[in-house]
Image: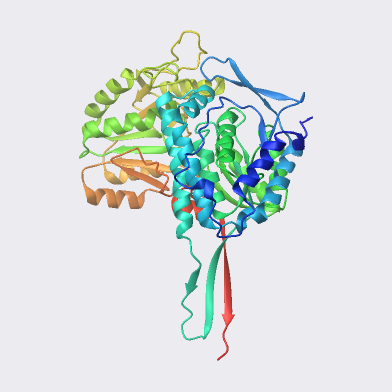
Amino acid sequence: MTLVPRRRVRKVMHASRSRRTGFQCRSGDRLGMWSPSVPPPRYARGMDSRLFVGGEWIGAAGGPTVAIRDAATGEVIADVPHAGELLAREAVDAAARALPAWRATAAADRAALLQRAARALRESTPALAAVITAENGKPIAEAEAEVAYSAAYLDSAAEAVCKVAAEEIDSGSTGRSMRATGEPIGVVAAISPWNFPLAMIARKTAPALAAGCTQVIKPSEITPLSALAFAHVLQDAGLPAGVVNVVAGDAPAIGRAWLGDGRVRKLAFTGSTAVGKELMRLAADQVVRLSLELGGHAPLIVFEDADIPRAVAAALAGKFRCSGQTCICPNRFLVARSVHDEFVAQFVAGASALRVGRGSDGANRIGPLINDAAVEKVRRHIEDAVARGGRVLTGGSTIPVAGCLDRFFAPTVIDNANASMLCFNEETFGPVAPIATFDTEDEAIALANATEFGLAAYLFTRDPSRIARVSAQLEYGIVGANTCAVSDARAPFGGVKWSGFGREGGRWGLDEYLSWKYVCESRPT
Ligand code: SIN
């Protein structure tokens, strides 16, 4: 691929940025332009389709591009350069060059930059949400919530890094000093998905930058524009050249280039379990640290003592967020036989009332699925469920939306579900809620745990002792009790089993980017 030579693009602007910030600062310098009295720049550029490497914006310059389409209409909204191994390596070069100065900055200064970028994200919400809705299709209110969620990850990492201190270890009466110091792990990579095109990057970039790492990012090839907008926000907030680099394109080539390059010391990936396993194999050669947030298959248990209207409201919000395309969406509903009819009647009424249509219209709650393959998978799961005795109570097919693609799937509720169905064994990643019944608490727990996945699980009950007992037995990284709104930048997000390992958010997320050095000093007696 022929790319515009980096040195020529925005050279002047770049030079003036380094003078303004004086970023080659000694550790401990306070960077005046980040003071809270200076308003953060707002992102208002619309969509930038260039890639971002070494602080420069790189166009295709006649090389291959990928058309990015409006998820609702299929209309081309941008052409993004399709990078391969070469640019992937150049991104690592840039990140490696930027590392010594960035890791030498004071944690407080890195935190200040993140807070400044968080404010800029919040203040740019309409522009950024419009980009997210265009390329992903989700309702605009959800896109706005995603911007807020992303900003919260920046703030959370900024707060966490200020609390990381070197630790003195009690050495007893050995006469030695023992000390552990958290050091940035080095150049890190992030590969992120299309379902939260901004937040899944923010929660990888925030702790990486806070820790003093530099980063190369590959956003989903379907939704790179949010990532590029994020890079603008970071650059405008004063991030030095090369600290963050965004390369979209040939995913296998980029992944191989990064995992085969001994300078990349960690990869954070959110995506499918199949790809996660492949990345684990590739990471072995260079012993690259991984954090993997992979598929989910969340059970939602409604016990007989649940507050049913509350359970229904939470289940609707959790199930149909991003049209059912989140890793933590309830995928299997397990309802106590005695409250089944009451729960199902209310849930079906709620699901069928959700308005389906373009995400850009604020009245709509369900947008399009991401592509035709997603629509086909949802169809296949429904047909399989019906063939195995399931009853479709509402939905079951796509809904035509004027001027749009045939990707708007009606919220679907399937009763009489059972463990033989595809939807009870695979993540559907669509707006389908299969409901099965149970008779005892032990049966509900066994059904909930009968999966290779272990990301999120939900239970609804009025009994606090049951919350404690059941949560302890659920083999999941995240448990929501009487809520499905578990996502919070201050909490550890991640799974067990085939849902992966490693955590994002709060101090746990930061720890993934630190390497603890232990210094043991023998003192003269
Ligand atoms: C995901 O679907 O992977 C992330 C959802 C969230 O963070 O709430």
Count of labels shown? 0
At which x and y percent is residue 451? 45, 41
Q: Tell me: 78 left or right of 378.
A: right
Q: Which residue is farthest bottom?
A: 525
At which x and y percent is residue 453? 47, 42
Question: Which quadrant: the C terminus?
Answer: bottom right
Instruction: Pick the residue in front: 471 or 517.
Output: 517
Q: Tell me: 86 left or right of 213.
A: right
Q: Tell me: 475 left or right of 273.
A: left
Q: Quadrant of residue 388?
A: top left
Would you say residue 244 is visible in this rendering? no
Q: Quadrant of residue 62?
A: top right
The image's colour scheme reads rainbow
Q: Quadrant of residue 421?
A: top left
97 in relation to 48, above or below: below
Would you say residue 133 is visible in this rendering? yes
Instruction: Pick the residue in front: 208 or 333.
Output: 208
Q: Which residue is painted at 53% across and 14% down in the image?
A: 73
Q: Which residue is painted at 73% across and 35% down in the image?
A: 84
At which x and y percent is residue 286? 70, 54
Question: Which quadrant: the N terminus?
Answer: top right
206 in relation to 517, above or below: above
At which x and y percent is residue 386? 41, 21
Q: Which residue is painted at 68% across and 32% down in the image?
A: 249
Q: Which residue is painted at 55% across and 45% down in the image?
A: 205
